[in-house]
Image (spheres, helix red, strand yellow):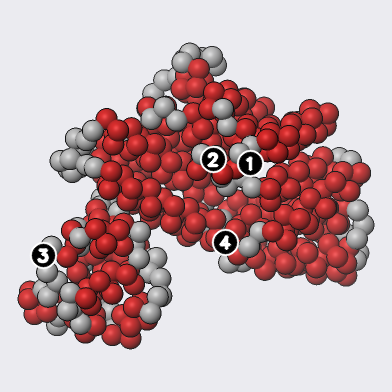
Amino acid sequence: MDASIGGGAVAGSDSKSRQSHPVPPDAWEQPEMRAALATREISSVYRLLRKHGVSQRQIAAMTGQSQSEVSEILKGRQVMAYDVLTRIADGLGVPRGYMGLAYDEATAIKVVGAADGQQAEEDESVKRRRFLAHAAQVTMGAAVFGPESGTWSAGPAKTPAPGRIGMTDVRQVEAATRALRSLDYQYGGGFCRDAVVAQLSWGQQMLESNGTEMVKNRLFVALADLHSLAGWTSFDTGLMDSARGHFANALDLAKQGDNHPLVANVLYRMGRVYLHQDAPNDALKLFQLGQIAAQESGSELAVAVLCANEAWAYAMMGNEEQAVKLLGRSKDEFARANLAEAESWVKFFTETDVYAMIGTVHTVLAAKNAEHTKYAIPALTKAVESYDDDMARSKTFMLSALATNHLLEGDLDHGAKVGSKAVDTAEGIKSERVKDRMRPLQVEAERRRNNADARDLADRLNSFYAA
């Protein structure tokens, strides 16, 4: 991004302030400041600048903000827009890499890969087979589904990398990943994907830097997790080829870092992509490969995650017996899991998620056998009650599924009320996946248009999709 974007006020009347630059040269190197920059806590950055004697007026002049904006940020207002973060970094003279903003077009191509449209001519089933082959090679060390060929991203000219890295640099990548993942959960991949890719572009450069073996191994794992997040946010915004490329890179790096739970997690996530594409057979193969990695890790929680998703795949394939059996195993593995000592990559899978998966699997089965609503509804209700605003996307999924089940069992009034709540939460989330997951609710509401409540819900859903 051009450093001049959004910075007209800085380059013009405030040039005098910038030339004198009241920020001490070593301010950006102090540990507390580096930590604030790494997590993009701009309010903390501004407060630390005030301790260095930089006034609100000077901060405003350098960043092109009004003094009232600076005051609000000092009071705790968050800054998340990428262009504003870039303007602040350039205006204050912060090295962009300290904030994960070292991003240019060449690095974007290297990190993201070719645009989805450039790969559209290749049949989707072929792409799935290629990824399965790659996943098998990473997991088992052999090409089970046929030889994997080609690369997952283009290779333009390299951007300069830091000369040497330490644990502090890696921790900054980890901290940024945690912060960005929270934004994804709450607002959807469309809200933060560009920021994830920007952070990844900086972190990727560190692979070329010098560092101890311990630092490099931890970097492999940190970047694998960041690639996994990039894949997930790409998936959430409908960029399937980009998602596949990121997940492939995540697998390679997780394997280099010898982190079996993370390999399992990446395979689970890519399997979810294939479930979303209505390819449960291919999804199941990825979940089964992930199961191998999960068992090698000794993590009951990782095994529980994979079993639950295998159940989902079997449900989509119409295999009720296997779906119910694997749900039971998922619950058993979860009950045995030591949650306090679980790897960070699987800690997202809580008791709430167990209920969510039970409800989701029985919702799929209920589409063919309405008897399953009696299992789906109580599980989904518990999940909805437990998800807070930080998990808005997941809550929306569950509200939509719950409403669908109520319509299927004939409770149209309550189904319409719950469905309306699903639309309320969905409207604040930037996620193509949310729209796709709400389609069954739209179908069931349309089928019951002779009922006023169902008709109102159908009309509202149609407006939601048309917006």
Among numbered discs 1 and 3, the one appearing first in the sequence:
3
Which residue in the structure is indicated by mark 3?
A: 25
Q: Is 404 situated left or right of 8 in this image?
A: right
Label 2, residues with CA under 10 Å away: few <14, some 14-19, many ≥20 = few
| Picture mark count | 4
Disc 1 to disc 4, how far (Cα)?
A: 23 Å
Q: Is residue 130 above or below residue 194?
A: above
- Tell me which residue sits at (24%, 82%) in the image: 56
How far apart in space, not on screen, are marks 1 and 2 (Cα)?
A: 31 Å
Answer whether labels 1 and 3 touch (C-beta < 8 Å).
no
In the image, which is nearer the foreground, mark 4 or mark 2? 2
> Which residue occupies 63% across, 62% down?
388
Question: Do callouts 2 and 3 mark residues in contact (Cβ within 8 Å)?
Answer: no
Residue 57: x and y, percent?
Answer: 21, 84
Provide the secondary structure element on which disc 3 rests.
loop
Name the amino acid type tagged 3: Pro
Q: Quadrant of residue 255?
A: top left
Name the residue rendered at 25%, 71% in the picture: 48
> Residue beneath label 1, please?
276
Distance in Å between CA atoms under marks 2 and 3: 42 Å
- Residue marked by disc 2: 341
Q: Please tell me whether mark 2 sits on a helix, a strand or a loop.
A: helix
Contact between labelled residues 2 and 1, with CB atoms less than 8 Å apart: no
Tell me the quadrant of the picture where the N terminus can be found. bottom left
